[in-house]
Amino acid sequence: MLANQTVHNDAAATGGTENVAANTVQFPSLAWFERLAELMNEQRSFHEKLGYMDCKVRFVVTDGHGAPYGVDIEFEEFGVVMVRKAGAGLGEAGPGGYGGTESDGSGWVPDFTMEASLATWRGMIESIAAGGGKPDLQQTLNDLNMRRHELVVNASDSLNRHLFFRYNQSLQAFVNASAAFVTTFPAMQSGAE
């Protein structure tokens, strides 16, 4: 196993080591997505320029914490109204893949899921940090889904799947906000055993 690895960026690292420690969040975790939600809600005027976004999204790390790990987020207009850990059924194969697009028993149903391996999410997050909030074009949600097929978008029907493309710029801006803090990742298996 390798030690926990950290993505540092200039915006998050200013202010000394105390500030960096307080501004560090591990991915994948509920806290990481809650921090993005806080940032989106604080930056309403920026998101108003991108346009409203009304959708329910399940973000899934297919191999997070040794098993699929998901977070449900509900976007409304120019902010986030709900963030929670995905409930029961995550990881069960079905029409929606790992994350599923069915209710988890709570009545909450995602419009679509975005599913990728920890390595794929990590590559995008590291690219965002290195670019000061702007990932390489090959590390965007759109490119990872359409060209590289490393990010799978699942929905119960084509209209819900279309929401990923309709709100893509806002979703990318949501994830790009991770440049405002330091992201750490769990220890990963090395290639040699």
Image (cartoon, grey):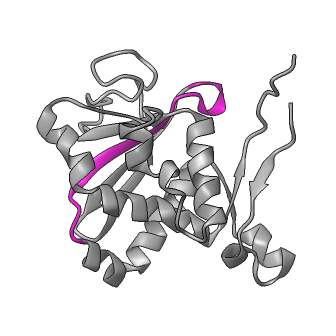
Rendered-image quadrant of the N terminus: top right
Residue at horizontal 60 percent and vertical 67 percent from the top: 131
Left or right of 61 on screen, residue 113:
left
Residue 153 spot, x, y in % from top left: 33, 35
- Out of 118 and 20, give the one closest to the viewer: 118
Task: Return the x and y of residue 190 as percentages of the image width and height.
Answer: 82, 28
Magenta span of residues? 51-67
Q: Nearer the viewer, residue 49 or 44?
A: 49
- Please give the name of the residue rendered at 18% of the width and 43% of the height, measured from the top-left corner: 162
Q: From where the camera sits, is residue 56 visible?
A: yes
Examine the rendered structure and indicate whether residue 137 appears above or below residue 17.
Answer: above
Asked whether 67 or 170 is in front, the reply is 170
x, y percent for residue 59: 43, 42
Q: Is residue 162 left or right of residue 129?
A: left
Is 55 magenta? The answer is yes
Question: Residue 161's quadrant in the figure?
Answer: top left
| Residue 81 can be seen in this image | no
Picture quadrant where residue 154 is located: top left
Where is residue 56? Give x, y as percent. Answer: 27, 48
Is residue 139 part of the magenta span, yes or no? no
Q: Along the horizontal axis of the image, is 17 left or right of 121?
A: right
Residue drawn where x is 53% and y is 60% of the image: 135
